[in-house]
Amino acid sequence: MTNKLSALTDEELISEFQTTNNVEAYELLVKRYKDPLMNFVFRFVGDKDVSSDIVQDTMIRFYLNKDSYKSFAKFSTWIYTIASNLAKNELKRRKRKNLFSLSSGEDEQQIDIKDRAATPDVMADSGIKNQIIQNALTKVKPVYREVVILRDIQDLSYEEIAEITGLSIGTVKSRINRGRTQLQKLLKNIYYE
Amino acid sequence: MPMNNNYYNEEDKNFNVLINTLKSLPQVSAPSDFEMNLQRKLNNLRHAEKHKDKESFFFFRKSFVPAAALALSVAVVFFMLFDFRTTEENPFMANPELKAEYSSNVNTTSIKNLLIDPINITSNDVVIKKKTSSPQPVVRPKKDVPQETFTGLAGTESQPNIREFLNSNRGQNVDRSMRAKPQSGGALYNDNSQIVSFDGFNLVNEDNDQTLYQLKARMDSLKKMMRRSR
C-alpha cells in the first residue's frame, strides 16, 4: 500500500487524504516536505528549534485544514504558504517581544561584533562562513528575505513564489533584486576574499 | 517537491556570485524525532477534539453562539424600549379620595357663576353657600318650607320681590325654626340650611345639580304661590 502511494504525486496524495482520510498519504507528504520546509523556515527565522516547531505546526495545520486545499493549486505552494505565514507570525512575535524586552539591544550588539570579526582569514572555516551568510540573511528585511530564500535557496520559480506570497510576478522580481542587493552589501567581505 | 527552476533572467546574472553562495549553503534537515513529535501532537489534538465533541454534545454548539447572543440582545433592547411597568395605581394601596375634593370636582359651572356675585341673583337662580366649617346636621322634614312663612306677602298688593324676600329672610332661615322638630325626620341640613347627606362615614354637602334643581323648583313654586296670593 505504501509503495503504491509513494508513486503518487503530491496532488494525488492530498486528494487521497482528503477523500479517504488515509493517514499514510498524509505521512508520506510529511516525509516529502519536512526537510524542504525546515530549510526554508530555518533560513527565514534563523533558529533550528523554532523552525522545527513551525514546521510541525505547518503539518498540523495541513492535517486539520486538509479540506481547504483546492485541487487547482499546487500542493507545494499551498504548504509553503502555510509555513511562510507561520514564520512571519514568529518574526512578528519576536519583534513585539524585543520591543518590550530590556535585553534585546544587547543581543543585537552581539551579532554586530560577530560580523566585524568576519575577516578573510577567519572565513576559511566554512562553518563560520555559513553562519555569517545566515546572519546576513536575518538582517535583510523579511519581505525581501522571504523571496530571496524561496528563489535562491529553495529554487522555486517566480510563478510559484508569486503564488505563495500572493504578489504579482513583477513585485516578486523587484523584491528579489532588492533583497539580493541588501545581502550583497552585507556579504561584501566574502566576495572580495 | 520543490522544482528545479534554474532559469535566470538577465538581472540574475548580476548576482551570480551571491546566488551561488546561497546555493552552497548546506540543507538543514528536520530533526530525527520530528515525525514522532508530530505524531504525539496529533494524538493530543485528536484526544482534545474528542473531549470537545463530548462537551459540545451536552452544551449548545459554538455555531449557535452568535444567534443566541443576537436573540439575547434583541430581548434586552425590546425590554429597554418598551416599559411594561403599569402606571395605574393600585386601588387597594392608594389613599382614599377626600369627599370634599370629590364634591368640588362636580361640574357646576352655572352654579359657580351664580356664586361669584350673590347680589346679581335673578328670580330663577339658586343661591348656594359653601362653608368649610364642620357641618352640624339638623334633621328636618322633607316638606320643609312652611307656606305660611312665604305667603305672608300675600296680603300686600305690591309685586312680590324674590330678592327682597330672600334678603329679608337671610339669616333667619325658616329652616332654623324647624330644627327644633327632629321628630319630623327626612333630609339632613347644616347650619347654613344646606342639605347634607350621610354616606355612612362622612357628612357631605349635596351641592349637586339635582339638589339645586330641587331648590330652584321649590323657589319657583314659592314664586307662583306669591303671585297667586296677590
Image: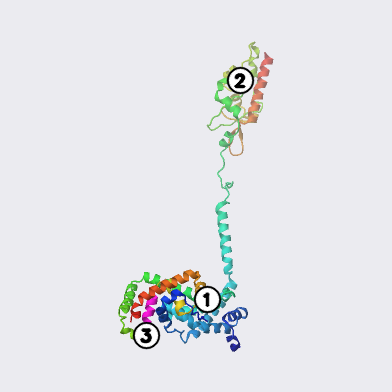
Task: Check disc 1: other Cα within 10 Å, few if <14, some if 14-19, many if 20+.
Answer: many
Q: CA distance from mark 2 to mark 3?
A: 132 Å
Residue B181 falls left or right of residue B11: right
Q: Which residue is mark 1?
A: A77
Q: Which residue is mark 2?
A: B122
Percent from the top left, x then y, of residue B145?
A: 64, 23
Residue A93 visible in the shown view: no
Above or below, A41 relative to B149:
below
Which residue is at the front of the view, A142 or B109? Answer: A142
Task: Please state which amino acid type lies under the numbered disc 2.
Answer: Thr
Task: Check disc 3: other Cα within 10 Å, few if <14, some if 14-19, many if 20+.
Answer: few
Above or below, B221 relative to A25:
above
Q: Which residue is mark 3?
A: A127
Give the secondary structure at mark 3.
Answer: helix
Which range of residues does the magenta coloring cover? A128-138
Above or below, A193 relative to A162:
below
In which chain is the residue bearing label 1?
A: A
Percent from the top left, x then y, of residue A50?
A: 43, 79
Percent from the top left, x then y, of residue A27?
A: 55, 84
Task: Please state which amino acid type lies under the numbered disc 1.
Answer: Thr
Q: CA distance from mark 2 to mark 1?
A: 113 Å
In which chain is the residue bearing label 2?
A: B
